[in-house]
Every structure is written in structure tokens, then in C-alpha cells.
């Protein structure tokens, strides 16, 4: 049963430019209109935001993914939060379906930044009160904050889709595209009660433009199986394509791609459409314009999940069950 919002007279929902369709869907499900703000981009790239209604003493939710154009969307968010704070909003909650820069969560080599931590610092310096996000690339990013971070999961959303299409049975196997993705894939495998396999990228050869290793071996039984390749992000699509090739080589019957965040940069659309995948199932944490739509793509909505989180946070109810949905 979906939770209903209570005493919403002082709740305000704002949407910036990264994902208006998702924001509209969330607002419809919450049962509140999106509040008004003017976002202006000047010729030199500067951004000016004006709040067009009173937010004094209000509980505010700002919906913004930090996706392409990443830096523009990030600055919109930071400026919006500053405007809300200066307008005396009582509480500022950032709903960030896609946390950009999360892949830079550690120093992989010397003299590198930890940009995921920098983003956390910027948000905290901007004095947000809470962050709501979905399927972080690295769960430890939550620890970069000293404020509450609600890290929601899409496991049930994908599980329901594959169950509806009769693709969860004794012949189903969940596949991690590399060793780093095992934890994410295991959660999904546990949810649908399926075995797990891992694509072992042992080759030293690295594709220069994509930075993806060529798969050499699959750990686990995929022969005559329906393989679900699960990842948190699909970017250039090369890793997903190469994973499908490796699984086909080792006898997989059908191969589906699953990814929460469809970044789809460079030639991803062509790469994925021409891959061995039956379908690529993603969510709408990132808005995909028409030119990034293709026949093999299926996009599921996280609007219900985020609506439920917003309502429960406002109602002071537990959101524990949303962490494993």
C-alpha cells in the first residue's frame, strides 16, 4: 500500500533542468504541484535562479540528477540550494536520482582527486539537510556525508519487470560484468533467487577510448541459460556489449542487460543496439531524449520509489523497506 502525504501545506517540490519528466511524475504521485522557480543561463555560461514563490519555513525537496551536462546540472543544484537557504526555507532535501562523479570515489593512482567526496563537501557547505539518491556506484559515498543519506535500491523494480515477462526461472543466471560489480549483482541475484556468474576480465589489453578490458572467461555456469548482466551504470555501452559476447561464447541462450543509470555517452546507442543483448533494461534516473532511444531499450520509472521516500521522510516514517526494493 502506497503511503499518503500528511499535512503538506508547507511542503514544496522544485525541479531543475536535468530530469523534468521524472520530477513531474514524482509530483503527480505525491499529489503536489511543482513549485515555481526561474532558471536562467546567460551567454557566458553563468546561471541565475530566482524562487518565484515563498518558501519561508517550508520543507523543500529539490529534484536534480547530476548527469550530462554534469557541471551545469551540479551548479544549478548548488545555486538553487543557496537561493532556498537565503529565502529562509526551514529544511532543504536534495533528491538526486543519479549522483554524478560517484565513480571517482577513491584514488586509483597517485595524484588523483576523490571527486565524489568533493561533491559531498560542496553539498554540505551549501547546507542541505538530507540527500536521497539511488544505486550509488560506490556505497561508501554515503560515508562522505555527515548528514542523513537515503540510498535507495532498484532491485525490486527490475525483479518485477523480469517476473512479469516470465524471465525468472531455474534457467536464469545473474551476471556481474566484472569483479567490482559482484556486490551489486549479488543483491539482484538474492532478490530473484538465482545463481550468480562473473565475467573475469583477466586480459591486460585495454581499449584506449573506452577503458574496458576484453573479457576472457566466465566464472559460473551460463550454458543454455538466460543471462541478466547487471550493472549500476551503462555509459559507452562497450562493457555491456563485450559482456554479451563473452556470455554467448560460453553458451548463454539469451542475454539481457540491466543498469540503473543510462548515461549512454559517445556511441552507446549504436553500440548497444548492435550488441547481442535481447533488451537493455534501465531506469529514468537520467532523462533520455529521443536521439538516445533505440528499439532494444526498456526504461522503467523510479517515480514511485522516490515518491514513497519523499512522503515517508515528510511523515517521519521509516524508509527501511525502500533500501531493498
Image: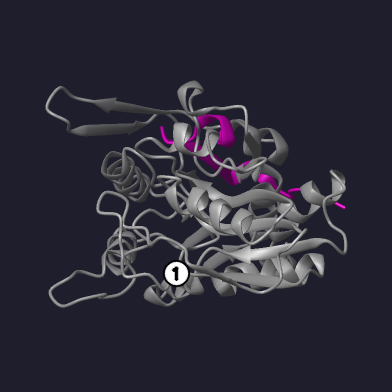
In the displayed structure image, the side of residue 77 where residue 180 appears, left or right: right
In the displayed structure image, the side of residue 163 where residue 157 appears, left or right: left
Assign a secondary structure to mark 1: loop
Res 43 visible: yes
Q: Residue at x 85, y 51 (%)?
A: 163
Q: Which residue is mark 1?
A: 201
Against 298, residue 43 (above or below) is: above
Task: Report crowding for label 1: few under 14, some 14 to 19, many 20 or more residues within 10 A (C-alpha).
Answer: some
In the displayed structure image, the side of residue 274 where residue 193 appears, left or right: right
Against 173, residue 311 (above or below) is: above
Q: Nearer the viewer, residue 226 or 41?
A: 226
Q: Residue at x 69, y 41 (%)?
A: 30
Q: Quadrant of residue 43?
A: top left
Which of the colour schemes (rainbow, by chain, secondary structure, one colour) is used? one colour
Q: Which quadrant is the C terminus positioned in?
A: bottom right
Estimate the x, y position of residue 66 in percent, counting from the top left: 39, 47
Determine if the magenta segment contains residue 16. yes
Estimate the x, y position of residue 101 in percent, counting from the top left: 34, 57
Res 318 visible: no
In the displayed structure image, the side of residue 229 where residue 146 appears, left or right: left
Counting every numbered tag in the picture gives 1
Q: Quadrant of residue 23?
A: top right
Determine if the magenta segment contains residue 19. yes
Q: Residue at x 37, y 70 (%)?
A: 203
Estimate the x, y position of residue 103 in percent, counting from the top left: 37, 62
Against 251, residue 267 (above or below) is: above
Estimate the x, y position of residue 206 in percent, counting from the top left: 30, 61
Q: Nearer the viewer, residue 301 or 64?
A: 301
* Magenta highlight range: 1-23
Amino acid at each position: 500500500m502506497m503511503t499518503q502525504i500528511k499535512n503538506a501545506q508547507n511542503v514544496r517540490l522544485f525541479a531543475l533542468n536535468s530530469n523534468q519528466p521524472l520530477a513531474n511524475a514524482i509530483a503527480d504521485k505525491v499529489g503536489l504541484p511543482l513549485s515555481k522557480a526561474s532558471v536562467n543561463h546567460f551567454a557566458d555560461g553563468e546561471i541565475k535562479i530566482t524562487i518565484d514563490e515563498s518558501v519561508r519555513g517550508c520543507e523543500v525537496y529539490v529534484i536534480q540528477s547530476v548527469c550530462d551536462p554534469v557541471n551545469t546540472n551540479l551548479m544549478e543544484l548548488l545555486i538553487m540550494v543557496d537561493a532556498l537557504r537565503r529565502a529562509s526555507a526551514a529544511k532543504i532535501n536534495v533528491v538526486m536520482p543519479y549522483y554524478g562523479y560517484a565513480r571517482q570515489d577513491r584514488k586509483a593512482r597517485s595524484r588523483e582527486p576523490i571527486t565524489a567526496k568533493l561533491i559531498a563537501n560542496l553539498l554540505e557547505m551549501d547546507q542541505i539537510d538530507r540527500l536521497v539518491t539511488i544505486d550509488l556506484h560506490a556505497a561508501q559515498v554515503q560515508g562522505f556525508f555527515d548528514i542523513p543519506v537515503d540510498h535507495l535500491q532498484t532491485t525490486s523494480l527490475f525483479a518485477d519487470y523480469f517476473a512479469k515477462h516470465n524471465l525468472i526461472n531455474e534457467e536464469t543466471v545473474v551476471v556481474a560484468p566484472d569483479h567490482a560489480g559482484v556486490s551489486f549483482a549479488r543483491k539482484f541475484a538474492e532478490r530473484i533467487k538465482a545463481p550468480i556468474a562473473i565475467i573475469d576480465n583477466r586480459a591486460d589489453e585495454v581499449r584506449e577510448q573506452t577503458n574496458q578490458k576484453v573479457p576472457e572467461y566466465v566464472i559460473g555456469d551460463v550454458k543454455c541459460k538466460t543471462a541478466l548482466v547487471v550493472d549500476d551504470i551503462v555509459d559507452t555501452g562497450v562493457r555491456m556489449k563485450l559482456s554479451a559476447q563473452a556470455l554467448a561464447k560460453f553458451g548463454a541462450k539469451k542475454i539481457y542487460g540491466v543498469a540503473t543509470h543510462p548515461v549512454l555517452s559517445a556511441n552507446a546507442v549504436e553500440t548497444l543496439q548492435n550488441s547481442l543483448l535481447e533488451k537493455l533494461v534501465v531506469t529514468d534516473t537520467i532523462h533520455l531524449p529521443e536521439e538516445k532511444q533505440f528499439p532494444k531499450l526498456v526504461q522503467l520509472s523510479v517515480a514511485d520509489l522516490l515518491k514513497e521516500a519523499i512522503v515517508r521522510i515528510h511523515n517521519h516514517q521509516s524508509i527501511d523497506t525502500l533500501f531493498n526494493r
